[in-house]
């Protein structure tokens, strides 16, 4: 009896020491969890989550301050990935945060007055143009965050949903009837 | 005759080839209207360089290649460009793509044809010539041929020991390569010699399945007549021996390592039809304007046609007289092909075969049952994969797992789905999983780019703020520095240095200030609502920035 | 037309055709069975078939699956037949019905139906029966010409359905222990092998009659292999392991361990090798995996026969190895094209 107890405590102590040692030895600087979360977030930088961008939201999730269902651009799949990463149950979006189809901003070049307000709003510098000159969106860099819409004094920016074309078309999930058609 | 090798798996579907080989290749008359897509090759679409109303000559360049993987597009006949814009194309999605609609003038007037003496031209020039002639692989992948002839991935092209001409044509029903080899073997062989010359390869092997004895005989005769040391290898009929990696294995015994290119093991392969177009390109100076295509299945006149690219499929099919119980068409073979979305699409470089389907020839499969893990698919898979596991994970959308089970080594040959007793559309699952994974990788790339740009912007704003502060401080210091001067103290050497520094700072500050002033604050003539909105945005942004700061600076544990 | 995917050719195989071939291949063994043990087995098989199809249809309805295509796949029928062939032919009707229903409802459909069962359904049914009703599960009819009394078919029927034996006939008079069972009992009594094998119950290789049934199953199994319905891996590894194990022990101590051939031709060895272990759903998909799986099953079968509490071990060996299948498959992934001779 005593021997068993002693043996078990000895094992516990040894294992504890190993764990403690490796915790010190392999400590990772920074907050890798936040990095991992940030890697999952779509980087739209839209602020719809209530944070000033994806990184702050990632930090907030890592600190346990924010829920995982606040990022509409990430879609259901984003929630799924976050849930998987954090080991929690996925939950649906709240009613105020619903994903929309991915779009890019488009500036009506006839109306644009060259005010640069949208340039200042864009979180990823995807608008090019100089003062008093017509601005254009670099479509490939636009994340579709819509942050440039409100500042425009002449409302010349609109969001165009990304259309499916031959180059970005995807094969569909096979759907077939279980029952042979009559 | 060198020894032949085997690959794992493979299937023996009924070949149905004799139907369409009874008649020689027929040249299709000029259609009333041609629709030429600008994306007929793998890679980026060509850029249109003509406008509606332009008159073009046969063989005139109308689409210029853009990007590394791209190829040129030409007018298949002389006539007037009527329209440039989206038109339905022969793509499984049925989506439109950018095309040029050409109304032929019936004169077939050619551009000036220039043949090329390939032996006395730099190889790089030859490659550029192929690119501008729109020569792409005609085996199905339509990959630009010039890239396959380029030294890639650090090899010198001299590493190529063996050139393989692929005449296996293993898919059932398709006979266009067979007929081409029977009727135009000499050009095929000469094209092979050009390719061999460009690669500097020592050995040329021509692989043809043994169910095409006429083609084998014709090719052997042509090789002899041209006096070339090529070897025509008669390989056993086994689907998919025409797949590049499998054919390389059969002919050389070498396996292209997973994720690498044939050139990495000193082999390159081209389809026989590609070799034919290379010969036409250099000998006659003709860019790629037409191809041979098989029309077979439920038609009264199954045969092969030589057809101008851009010919509407409906015109082509009409010549073969589809029977009345035809309920749809396939493009490509029955193993890897897809249903034709509509007959109102043009023929493209990738179109090798059209098959009319009837219930008798292609009965609808019985109901799909669950996978019983019988392993037949694994026994048939030429890539030694475990298709049932891939299916399981693709169905569950567990894409990570599909990749660790080597989804991307699947060549989508369909051997597994052919033998599956549960009739599961396995390949459809793989295609789905592959395109999802590709799209995700794309998303990931753009997210990474967005993150980088965003971080850079934050950094830039931080820097601007710092500079502003510095400017302020410099001003203060300037004010302080003028004070002692006013009390009449003699400046010391170090003071002189400080003075110089201050002057620079002042100049900088002034420049900055000027720049700031020049910035229009586009805030005149705004309605109160707009002002309020802007104020609100500014407030939101300020709040957000505040939040960001507190979060970054005081991370809670 | 909506659900029409490549390849568009009509496919050479269907599940239903495969299962039908397996059923067909069981016929020689069944014929031998009838010849040596009377037609009672046909009654059990029919009972099992009806129960299997009935419960299958019921479960499909409950699970809201289409009934017709699944009934036509013949897999339920096969499960029923295999169970009926594994239990004593004179088993009362409710034993067959309960066992088959258990196979289909619990071992098959509660795991998700066709293709999803971890265990071989027939063997699950067998294990449940032998644990729950050991008495009924050991009433094996004596082979033709050996019993004190032979029942007529009518008598057999009456016993199966009503539990009534003809007057003056005891159960002991018409049944006897199986050859494997007899061997085990007598070995426990320290009798030498030679003397045991001289008993009338033993034939040329193994049990009188039952060895012929095994020949029947062997013939059917070879037919399946020839038709490429099953691959050679499982039968070879299973029978090979049994042969090797039995051979080693027999050579070391012939007085206490019977020959390998005795093991091959007694009990469910042949049925197991060609029909039970080869069930695709519950066996590994990789070739190496099949070899490991069947070798393991052979080892366990032999150990149970030679040293365990039950006379035969095929059923438990199958179930034990079924558990290991996912692991075996994971560790026997084949080298794919272009990765041979390199680290995976
Ligand atoms: S809601 Fe917008 S800012 Fe927030 S994490 Fe999602 S994409 Fe990033
Ligand atoms: S052939 Fe079909 S049923 Fe058999 S294992 Fe493969 S996917 Fe499953
Ligand atoms: S389609 Fe892919 S998985 Fe199926 S047999 Fe061909 S290579 Fe193997």
Image: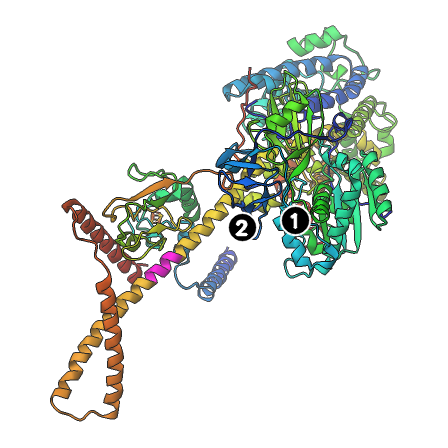
A117 and B283: which is toward the camera: B283
Residue A144 seen from this side = yes
What residue is disc 1 on? B145
Quick one: quadrant of the C terminus of chain B? bottom left
Mark 2 to mark 1 CA distance (whole Å): 15 Å
In the image, the segment drawn in magenta is B453-459
Under circle 2, the secondary element is: loop
What residue is disc 2 on? B66
B139 sits left or right of A84 in the view:
right
Measured from the top left, where is residue C88 in percent x and y? 71, 20
Dot 1 crowding, Cα within 10 Å, few <14, some 14–19, many 20+: many
Where B147 sits versus B215, above or below? below
Circle 1 chain? B
- Is B456 a magenta residue? yes
Colour scheme of the picture: rainbow
* Total number of numbered discs in the rendering: 2
Measured from the top left, where is residue C185 in percent x and y? 76, 30
- Disc 1 CB within 8 Å of nearest ligand 3 atom: no
B29 and C197: which is toward the camera: B29
Dot 2 crowding, Cα within 10 Å, few <14, some 14–19, many 20+: some
Q: Quadrant of residue C229?
A: top right
- Is C238 a magenta residue? no
Point out the residue furthest to the left here. Answer: B487
Measured from the top left, where is residue B547 in percent x and y? 26, 56
Q: Quadrant of ligand 2?
A: top right
- Considering the whole magenta stretch, tell me its main secondary structure: helix
């Amino acid at each position: 009896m005593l021997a068993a107890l002693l043996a078990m405590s000895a094992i516990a102590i040894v294992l504890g020491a190993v764990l403690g040692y490796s915790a010190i030895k392999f400590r990772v600087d920074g907050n890798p969890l936040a990095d991992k979360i940030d890697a999952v977030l779509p980087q739209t930088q839209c602020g719809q989550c209530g944070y000033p961008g994806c990184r702050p939201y990632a930090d907030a999730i890592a600190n346990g301050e924010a829920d995982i269902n606040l990022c509409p651009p990430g879609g259901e799949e984003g929630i799924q990935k976050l849930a998987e990463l954090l080991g929690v149950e996925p939950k649906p979006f709240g009613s105020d945060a619903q994903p929309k189809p991915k779009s890019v901003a488009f500036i009506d070049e006839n109306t644009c007055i060259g005010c640069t307000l949208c340039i200042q709003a864009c979180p990823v510098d995807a608008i090019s143009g100089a003062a008093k000159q017509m601005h254009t969106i670099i479509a490939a860099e636009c994340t579709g965050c819509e942050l440039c819409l409100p500042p425009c004094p002449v409302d010349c920016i609109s969001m165009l949903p990304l259309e499916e074309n031959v180059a970005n078309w995807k094969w569909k999930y096979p759907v077939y009837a279980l029952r042979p058609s009559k | 005759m060198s020894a032949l090798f085997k690959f794992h798996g493979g299937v023996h579907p009924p070949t149905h080839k004799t139907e369409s080989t009874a008649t020689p290749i027929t040249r299709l008359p000029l259609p009333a209207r041609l629709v030429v897509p600008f994306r007929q090759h793998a890679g980026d679409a060509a850029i249109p360089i003509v406008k509606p109303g332009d008159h073009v000559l046969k063989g005139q360049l109308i689409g210029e290649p853009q990007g590394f993987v791209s190829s040129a597009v030409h007018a298949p006949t002389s006539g007037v460009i009527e329209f440039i814009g989206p038109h339905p194309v022969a793509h499984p999605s049925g989506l439109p793509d950018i095309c040029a609609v050409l109304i032929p003038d019936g004169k077939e007037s050619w551009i000036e044809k220039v043949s090329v003496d390939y032996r006395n031209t730099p190889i790089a020039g030859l490659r550029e010539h192929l690119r501008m002639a729109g020569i792409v692989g005609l085996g199905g992948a339509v990959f630009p041929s010039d890239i396959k002839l380029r030294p890639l991935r650090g090899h010198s092209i001299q590493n190529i020991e063996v050139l393989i001409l692929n005449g296996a044509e293993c898919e059932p029903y398709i006979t266009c390569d067979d007929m081409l080899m029977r009727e135009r073997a000499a050009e095929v062989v000469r094209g092979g010699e050009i390719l061999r010359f460009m690669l500097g390869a020592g050995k040329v092997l021509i692989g043809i399945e043994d169910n095409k004895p006429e083609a084998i005989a014709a090719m052997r005769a042509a090789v002899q007549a041209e006096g070339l040391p090529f070897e025509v290898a008669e390989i056993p009929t086994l689907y998919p021996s025409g797949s590049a990696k499998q054919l390389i294995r059969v002919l050389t015994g070498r396996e292209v390592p997973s994720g690498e290119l044939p050139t990495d093991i000193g082999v390159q392969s081209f389809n026989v039809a590609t070799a034919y177009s290379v010969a036409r390109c250099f000998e006659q100076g003709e860019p790629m304007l037409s191809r041979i295509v098989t029309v077979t299945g439920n038609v009264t006149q199954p045969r092969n046609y030589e057809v101008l690219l851009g010919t509407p499929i409906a015109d082509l099919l009409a010549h073969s007289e589809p029977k009345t119980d035809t309920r749809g068409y396939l493009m490509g073979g029955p193993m890897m092909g897809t249903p034709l979305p509509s007959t109102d699409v043009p023929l493209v470089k990738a179109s090798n075969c059209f098959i009319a389907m009837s219930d008798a020839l292609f009965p609808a499969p019985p109901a799909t049952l669950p996978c019983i893990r019988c392993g037949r698919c694994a026994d048939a898979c030429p890539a030694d994969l475990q298709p049932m596991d891939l299916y399981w994970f693709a169905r569950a959308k567990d894409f990570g797992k599909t990749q660790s089970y080597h989804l991307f080594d699947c060549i989508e040959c369909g051997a597994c789905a052919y033998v599956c007793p549960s009739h599961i559309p396995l390949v459809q699952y793989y295609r789905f999983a592959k395109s999802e994974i590709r799209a995700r990788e794309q998303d990931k790339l753009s997210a990474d780019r967005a993150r980088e740009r965003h971080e850079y912007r934050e950094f830039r704003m931080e820097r601007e703020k710092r500079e502003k502060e510095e400017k302020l401080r410099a001003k203060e210091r300037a004010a302080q520095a003028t004070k002692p001067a006013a009390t009449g103290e003699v400046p010391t050497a170090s003071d002189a240095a400080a003075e110089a520094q201050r002057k620079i700072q002042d100049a900088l500050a002034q420049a900055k200030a000027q720049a700031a002033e020049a910035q229009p604050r586009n805030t005149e003539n705004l309605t109160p609502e707009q002002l309020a909105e802007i104020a609100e945005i500014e407030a939101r942004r300020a709040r957000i920035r505040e939040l960001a700061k507190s979060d970054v600076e005081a991370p809670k544990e | 037309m909506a659900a029409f995917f490549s390849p568009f050719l009509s496919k050479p195989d269907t599940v239903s055709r495969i299962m039908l071939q397996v059923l067909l291949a069981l016929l020689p063994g069944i014929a031998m069975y009838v010849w040596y043990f009377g037609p009672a087995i046909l009654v059990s098989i029919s009972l099992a078939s009806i129960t299997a199809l009935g419960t299958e249809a019921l479960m499909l309805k409950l699970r809201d699956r289409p009934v017709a295509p699944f009934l036509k796949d013949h897999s339920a029928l096969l499960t029923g037949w295999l169970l009926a062939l594994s239990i004593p032919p004179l088993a009362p009707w409710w034993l067959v019905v309960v066992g088959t229903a258990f196979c289909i409802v619990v071992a098959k459909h509660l795991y998700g139906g066709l293709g999803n069962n971890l265990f071989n359904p027939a063997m699950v049914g067998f294990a449940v029966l032998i644990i729950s009703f050991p008495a009924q599960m050991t009433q094996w009819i004596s082979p033709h010409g050996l019993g004190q009394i032979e029942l007529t078919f009518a008598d057999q029927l009456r016993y199966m359905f009503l539990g009534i034996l003809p007057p003056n006939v005891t159960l002991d008079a018409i049944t006897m222990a199986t050859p494997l069972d007899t061997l085990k009992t007598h070995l426990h009594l320290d009798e030498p092998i030679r003397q045991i094998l001289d008993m009338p119950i033993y034939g040329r290789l193994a049990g009188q009659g039952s060895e012929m049934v095994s020949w029947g199953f062997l013939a059917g199994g070879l037919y399946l292999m020839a038709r490429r319905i099953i691959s050679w891996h499982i039968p070879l590894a299973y029978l090979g392991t049994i042969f090797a194990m039995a051979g080693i022990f027999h050579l070391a101590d012939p007085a206490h361990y019977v020959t390998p051939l005795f093991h091959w031709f007694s009990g469910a060895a042949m049925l197991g090798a060609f029909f039970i272990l080869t069930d695709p759903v519950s066996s590994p998909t990789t070739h190496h995996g099949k070899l490991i799986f069947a070798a393991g099953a052979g080892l366990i079968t032999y150990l149970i026969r030679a040293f365990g509490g039950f006379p035969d071990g095929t059923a438990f060996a199958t179930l034990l190895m079924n558990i290991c299948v996912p692991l075996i498959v994971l560790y026997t992934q084949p080298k794919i094209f272009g990765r041979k001779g390199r680290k995976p």
